[in-house]
Image (cartoon, grey):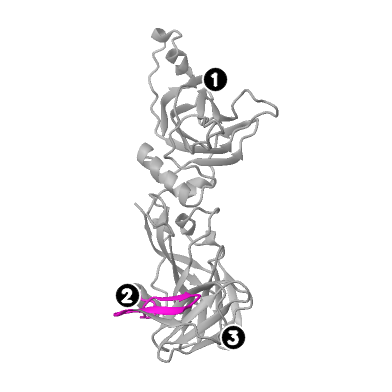
Amino acid sequence: MIVLKAWWRPLRVCIFGLACATLAIATPAFADRELHVVAVGKGWLASGDFTNAPRAKVWVDRPGVSVVLVLLDKGGVEWQVEASDKSFIETIILGGQEATPSATGFTAKSTILFHELPWPIDKNTYLPFIDNFQGGPFRNLLSELSIETALNWASSVQVRRRATEGVISVSSFNQSRDRPLGYLELLVGQTSDLPQSIQAYLVNPTRGGGPKANFTATGMEFETNAGPKFFPLPDGVERPFLPNGAFYDVVTNAIYGVTFGGPGWIYQVDIETGNWEVLASLRGYDGAEILYDPGKDLFVLTGARSRPGEIALVNPDKSIDTVLFEVRALPGFTDLYAYPNALPPRLTPRIYEGQWLIADATSKLEEGIAGYGKHRLYALNLVTREVRLLAFTDFQ
C-alpha cells in the first residue's frame, strides 16, 4: 500500500520549492475524518492514443473534513487527483492488483498526479481490488483499511469497470456507510418468541441427533464410531445425476439424499436393510441440502448453485411449495464469498418448526481472510418471509 501523507492544495507550492520559507502552513485539525474509496478496473484512453497512459480523474470536494482517499485499480492507471481549495486530503492510499505483464515482460505501474505534479511511487498490491461494496473482498478491504487508518466504515465507495474522460467526484456519501466493520452486532435478532423446540436446538445444536451423511454417485454413507459406513447404489436403481446433500434421520434410521440438474430426485436408503428407494421427483427444482421431519413426513430443501435461499417443502403427497429468500436479504450472507462474482456457499437446513426454519451457512474459504465472514445462523419464516440473524463468526 502506498500512502501519501497530508497534502493540502495550498501547501503543495511549498513542497516543490516555491517560496517555501514564507508559507509555513500548519496541518489543520478536523473533528471528522472520512474514508472514500474509488476503484477503477481500467483507465480511460482516447481512441488512437498510443502515447499516454490510461487515466482516471478524481475530484475531491469535502470541505471541513479530513479525507483519506483510497485508489484501487488493476494496474497501469495514471490517477489524476485534484481537490477543491477548502478540501483537505489527509492520506492517499494506492492498492489493487498488478497489471498483466505484456509480451515483453513489462508490467505497467500505476501512478498518481496530485494537481498535475507526479509522485514517484511503486505499486503495492496487498489491498484487494473490489468491484462491489458488498461481499467478502469489500469486507476484507475495510478490515485492512481499519488497521491502517483507524476508520471502520467508508463514507463512499465508487466502482467503475472503466474510467471515462470525465472526473469521478468525491463529494458525498453513498450507501456503503451502512455497512461498517462490526455492523452485524446490531442486526442479531431475538429468539424468545421462537418455538420451544427451536430454542432447545439453539441451546444445544444438533442436526436431528444423527451423524453426518454424504451422497455420491456410487452410494451414501454416514459416520459411525467405527468409521464411515457405506451403502453402495445397487443395480436396478436409477443412477443419481449430480448427487448433492444428504441427511441421516435417527427416527426412521434412513439416509435421505437430494440431486440437482434435470428433474431432481429424493433418494432413501434404509441403513438396516441397505434397501434403496427413489421417493419423489423435484420437478426441476435444484436442491443442495435436505432435512427430513418424520413427524410431519416433510422434506425441507435448500437451493443449489446461485439460489441457496430458494426453500422447497416437499409435502407427504409429494406436492412442492417453494419460497425464495434473496441472498441480500440474509444479513451478512454476502460477506461469506466474493459476491456477486462467485457461487455462494450452501444454506443448510437444521430444524423446521411452526413456520420457522433454522439454517446456516459457512464460507467455502479453506483459510480465513480478515474481514470475510466465516459462519452465519439464520431463522427464516417461510410464511411471513421474515429473516433473523441469530449468530455469526468472522475470520480474524
From this view, report whether residue 386 is shown above or below residue 92: below
Find residue 55 and report its horizontal and vertical position in percent.
59, 29
Tell me the kind of residue under disc 2. Asn
> Which disc number belongs to residue 116?
1
Residue hosting label 2: 204
Question: Pointer 3 and pointer 1: residues touching (CB < 8 Å)?
Answer: no
CA gap between label 1 and label 2 equals 63 Å
Residue hosting label 3: 318
Element class at badge 3? loop
Disc 1 crowd, CA 10 A, few/some/many (<14, 14-19, 20+): few
CA gap between label 3 and label 2 equals 32 Å
Q: Quadrant of residue 93?
A: top left
- Indicate whether residue 37 is drawn in magenta: no
CA gap between label 3 and label 1 equals 70 Å
Dot 1 or dot 2, earlier in sequence: 1
Find residue 213 and report its horizontal and vertical position in percent.
41, 77
From this view, report whether residue 168 is shown above or below residue 365: above
Q: Nearer the viewer, residue 108 or 388?
A: 108
From this view, report whether residue 48 is shown above or below residue 216: above
- Indicate whether residue 209 is drawn in magenta: yes
Please indicate, yes or no, whether residue 268 appears anywhere in the rendered image. Answer: yes
Find residue 250 and report its horizontal and vertical position in percent.
38, 85
Dot 3 or dot 2, earlier in sequence: 2
Question: Pointer 3 and pointer 2: residues touching (CB < 8 Å)?
Answer: no
Q: Quadrant of residue 220?
A: bottom left
Find residue 91 and report its horizontal and vertical position in percent.
42, 30
Q: Nearer the viewer, residue 237 or 60?
A: 237
Tell me the kind of residue under disc 1. Glu
Disc 3 crowd, CA 10 A, few/some/many (<14, 14-19, 20+): some
Tell me the kind of residue under disc 3. Lys
Residue at horizontal 51%, vertical 68%?
Answer: 386
Tell me which segment is drawn in magenta. 204-227
